[in-house]
Amino acid sequence: MSIPHHISSQLLQLKSEEEIKVIIKDQEECLKIYQDTQQKLEAFNKFSKARYQQVHKHFEIHTKLLKQVKTDLDTVFIKLRKLKKELALKYPNHYEAALEKYPAPQLSDD
């Protein structure tokens, strides 16, 4: 016997009107809980959507800023390399002395 048939036969065997009222009351309580939960979830989803849009705008602004900073730093380092190369060609002795006195830092790849 399938579950729906079993449930329907059990309901038909109920003789007391009181038992049916209890079942209906329980179903109404479950429905109310479900509706309250649904309202809370809808409110939370609206709040989350608004916060996400706000945070997303800030994220885009910061991403653009970081890209611009990277571009600027790349430009600065290109100019520094070019300047160092010109100094090394124009003043090789002084450049070597400066490198001995102030060696380039050794960076580890962490």
Image (cartoon, rainbow, N blue to C red):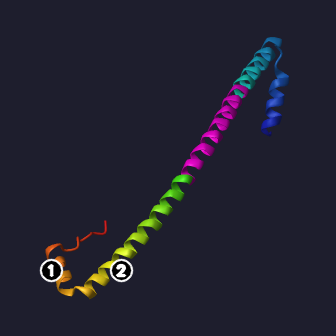
Residue 21's x, y, as percent? 80, 14
Residue drawn at x 64%, y 39% as measured from the top left: 50
Q: Which mark is residue 77?
A: none
Residue sitting nearer the eye, 43 or 79: 79
Above or below, 18 against 23 in this view is: above
Q: Kindly state the secondary structure of the residue where label 1 is placed.
A: helix
Q: How crowded is mark 2: few (under 14 residues within 10 Å), some or many (20 or more)?
A: few
Residue 82's x, y, as percent? 36, 80
Place residue 44 in its image quadrant.
top right
Q: In this view, does 69 lie to the left or right of 108?
A: right
Above or below, 95 against 27 in this view is: below
Which residue is the site of mark 1?
A: 97
Q: How many marks?
A: 2
Which residue is the site of mark 2?
A: 82
Residue sitting nearer the eye, 85 or 27: 85
Residue 8 located within the stretch drawn in magenta: no
Start-end of magenta stretch: 35-60
Above or below, 71 against 93 in this view is: above
Place residue 70 in its image quadrant.
bottom left
Q: Kindly state the secondary structure of the residue where label 2 is placed.
A: helix
Place residue 25 in its image quadrant.
top right
Residue 51 located within the stretch drawn in magenta: yes
Residue 98's x, y, as percent? 17, 77
Residue sitting nearer the eye, 61 or 8: 61
Residue 19's x, y, as percent? 78, 15
Residue drawn at x 82%, y 13% as measured from the top left: 16
| Sequence-first tag of 1 and 2 | 2
Residue drawn at x 39%, y 75% as measured from the top left: 78
